[in-house]
Image: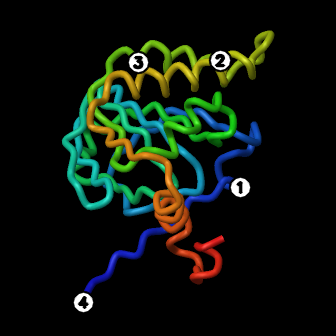
Amino acid sequence: MNKHVPFKLGKERYFTKDPNFTVVEHLLRKDYPLHWHEFYEIEYIVSGNATEIINGTEYEVGPGFAVLLTPADLHSYKNVNAEEYLTIHNVKFSPYLLPPELQKALNSISAPLCGTCSAIGPVFSKLLQEYNGQDFAREPFILASITQICILLFRCCQEVHYSPKDPEREMILYIREHFLEPINVETVAS
């Protein structure tokens, strides 16, 4: 039996320049294995085509496709063409950087927030330029851009299922975010 154990991507690997966010352009030339991370991540496909598997569901991705991934989401890429490759604009961030309304919305996501949202492309391009520069008010600009991208995703993608905030929902979210750690009933109940 061949088990694919997802690996964890931690903040210490990515948040080296700034403690709460990182912005990069990836050129993916081969399939990428199943993984998860302890931060939120937004991916925007600039060019290329592939299959992204998120929590066991396959999505055909190409230019204009965007996805917001939570710490509870497992994902991978397959069918990446080495000659064509996949260009991905990517931001990894702590949700505490966002306004309370968006933090609440992020905590309410019960399915991947993804779909075609070409309006994100120009914002992401400017965000990458700003992240790699040292212009005046760099950090506020970056935070405003991440906020804008999140809002655009919520507006573009209708697949999100919201649930009311209640104790059971909070327990489920806790378990989703800590499923690879030892969890006991007392911890979840508190």
Instruction: Report x, y in % for residue 19.
Output: 76, 42
* Mark seen at residue 87: none
Q: Is residue 13 left or right of residue 86?
A: right
| Residue at image coords 78%, 13% | 137
* Mark seen at residue 1: 4
Q: Do residues under tags 3 and 4 come within 8 Å of each other at their CB atoms?
A: no
Mark 3 and mark 4 lie on one chain; the one further toward the N terminus is 4
Q: Do residues under tags 1 and 3 come within 8 Å of each other at their CB atoms?
A: no
* Mark seen at residue 121: 3
Mark 1 and mark 3 lie on one chain; the one further toward the N terminus is 1
Label 2: element kind: helix
Label 1: element kind: helix
Q: Which residue bears the numbered disc 1?
A: 12
Quarter of the rendering occupied by the C terminus: bottom right
Q: Nearer the viewer, residue 19 or 48?
A: 19
Mark 2 and mark 3 lie on one chain; the one further toward the N terminus is 3
Given the image, on which type of amino acid does mark 1 rest? Glu
Binning the other alpha carbons within 10 Å of mark 3 as few (below 14), some (14 to 19) or many (20 upward) gives: some
Mark 2 and mark 4 lie on one chain; the one further toward the N terminus is 4
Q: Which residue bears the numbered disc 2?
A: 130
Q: Nearer the viewer, residue 152 or 36?
A: 152
Binning the other alpha carbons within 10 Å of mark 4 as few (below 14), some (14 to 19) or many (20 upward) gives: few
Distance, label 2 to label 4, CA atoms, is 47 Å
Given the image, on which type of amino acid does mark 4 rest? Met
